[in-house]
Amino acid sequence: LSGHEYDSELSCKVTASHRYYITHKDTEKFLHLVSHKKHHYKAVRSKNTKDSRWDHEDICNVKFRICKFRINLPGSDDEWEVLITNLDRNKYPLARMKEIYHLRWGIETSFRELKYDLSGVQFHSKKDQFVYMEIYAHFAMYDAVSLSVAASSKPYVKSKYQYQIDFKMACCIWRRYF
């Protein structure tokens, strides 16, 4: 199905039990092991951090939908997007999924700027309350930088390309200011 749009439903079984996975992996189709043990990040966790454990039984049947659609106009180079979702096919047909994906693009770029331009990937705190405080500080800085970039104007120059103000450079200027 390389050159066509499609919308199909799949399901798989998920378990957190290593014993169940080892004994049934060869006989059961689409069985996946979720190994969410705290050992790999135990050193950076506070004792006050809430634990998000696997809250299902030994086996959980997961149903999802795979949507593949073209994101550019026909006739140009093929660019496809594949989405995995649990949205209902009747309420959200493939055409609606395209619209939602298009609307989501601005959100994705905003999160990329929050994560990388404003260093919102690494936190300095261990307790949940302080991590939330850092996240809110990143949101406030993002809003301030976005407003300043939107309010400032670049003088129009007759040239081949219209230039924009670099968001990352604006972040650096704001960081130096504060």
Image (spheres, rainbow, N blue to C red):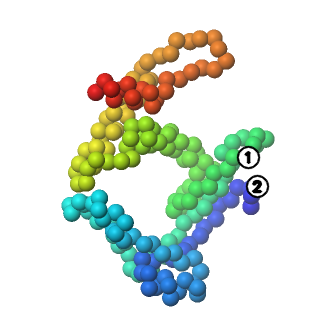
Image quarter hosting the C terminus: top left
Q: Secondary structure at mark 1?
A: loop
Which of the two labelled residues, at mark 1 and mark 2, occupies the earlier sequence position?
2
Q: Of the residues shown, which amino acid type is indicated by label 2?
A: Gly
Mark number, residue 3: 2
Spatial CA span between label 1 and label 2: 8 Å
Q: Nearer the viewer, residue 137 or 10?
A: 137
Which residue appears at 36% of the width and 71% of the height? 37
The answer to whether the residues at label 1 and label 2 have Cβ atoms under 8 Å apart is yes
Outermost residue on the left side: it is 48
Please indicate whether residue 105 sits to the left or right of residue 115 in the image.
right
Outermost residue on the front side: it is 43
Which residue appears at 68% of the width and 59% of the height? 6
Instruction: Using a 10 Å C-alpha cutoff, classify the residue at mark 2 as few (fewer than 14 neighbours), some (14 to 19) or many (20 or more).
Output: few
Please indicate whether residue 139 sits to the left or right of residue 20 in the image.
left
Can residue 83 be seen here? The reply is: yes
Which residue appears at 70% of the width and 55% of the height? 5
Residue 147 coordinates in the image, percent (x, y) = 39, 26
Q: Secondary structure at mark 2?
A: loop
Which residue, given by chain and number where applicable, does mark 1 sit on? 78
Which residue appears at 42% of the width and 26% of the height? 170
Residue 90 coordinates in the image, percent (x, y) = 57, 60
